[in-house]
Amino acid sequence: MKFASYMHAHAQLVQPHYGVVVDSMVYDLQTPFQPSLRDALTSEGLDGLVSRATKRLASGDGMPLESVKLLIPITHPEKIFCVGLNFFKHAQEAGMEVPSKPSIFVRYPSSLVGHDAAVERPTVSDQFDYEAELAVIIGKTAYQISEAQALDYVAGYSCLAENSVRDWQRHSNQATPGKNFMRSGAFGPWLVTPDESGPAQMMTIEGWLNGECVQSDSGADMIFSVAQTISYLSTFTELVPGDVISLGTPAGVGFSRKPPRYLKPGDVFEVNISNVGRLKNVVIQGN
């Protein structure tokens, strides 16, 4: 199943909702006790959410997907972790050794917008780079779990444009400043459950810039798999429902090209992941 968060007009008030997406329709699932997708995962788990969605679909009464504004799938995640240098060819193009442990940094929700929203190039830099990534969403609390257990804690997958402001990323050996400019990245269009997406190693992760495929690799070529990454993170922190883990970008990013190819206003960057979806965003100049 696919689950999305969105906005629409209801009783003259605009408020976030979430629902199940089938073809070009969305069916609302919001309740007073489960006002967000993260709340639903926390209170009833993925199985409960899927069961409720199945009953909701039987009742009909959906809305055209084109009539709503999609938000990031988990509207208020507690934690967003990102893995750097997680594809062999990307480490090679960056001129860096293959890491022996995952390289982890964090993003904040304010740095991400939803599908079809504008991402902003900051005024302080002209080195705004694209990065297509697969994101995994945690479905239940995980603490100090093994790699063999890890996939049981996955609620689903999504697309993430983990765009980077390269000069700010390199101010020191900490990547955080270059990864958290307001509205610089994107996340969506929805969460796809593992039974529909299939395993990550079978997915193709692509980045498309102005209609040209500039990044493409298989999930099988990740240095650290989904299971390895979840297990590693759970060793030092408790992962909770709705936490997001972005799993690194394939080779082909803008800084590696000669000359460099950075995002500029008017560009359209898309993240396409097989069996997951296609995330599309236009670039505008930030204030």
Image: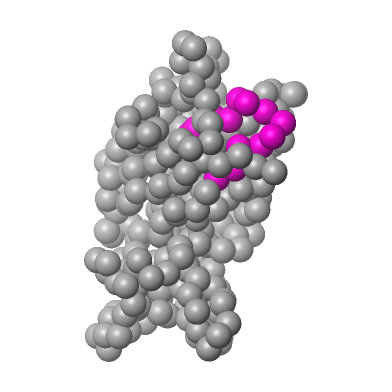
Q: Could you say which is closer to the camera, residue 61 or residue 88?
A: 61
Q: Please tell me which residue is depicted at 61% across the width and 48% down the height of the picture.
A: 183
Relative height, residue 156 to residue 27 (above, below): above
* Residue at (60% x, 25% y) in the render: 127
Q: Residue at x 28, y 81 (%)?
A: 57
Residue at the image point whose x is 39% and y is 41% from the top: 270
Task: Return the residue nearer the eye: 41 or 5.
Answer: 5
Q: Which residues are magenta?
A: 119-131
The quarter of the rendered structure image containing the C terminus is top right
Q: Is residue 121 above or below residue 278?
A: above
* Residue 96 in view here: yes
| Residue 254 x %, y % | 49, 23
52 and 126: which is toward the camera: 126
- Magenta stretch, overall SS: loop
Q: Which part of the image, by quadrant, shows the N terminus?
A: bottom left
Q: Residue furthest right?
A: 172
Q: Position of residue 32 (x, y in %)?
A: 55, 87
Side of 74 where 169 appears, left or right = right
Residue 204 position in % (x across, y down): 30, 38
- Comparing 146 with 215, the one in front is 215
Whether residue 128 is in magenta: the answer is: yes
Q: Quadrant of residue 35?
A: bottom right
Q: How many marks?
A: 0
The answer to whether any part of residue 143 appears in the image is no
Residue 40 lies left or right of residue 286; in this view the side is: left
User: What colour scheme does the image use?
Assistant: one colour
Position of 173 with respect to 145 (left or right) is right
- Let me know if residue 248 is in the magenta part: no
Where residue 137 sits in the image (x, y, percent)? 48, 56
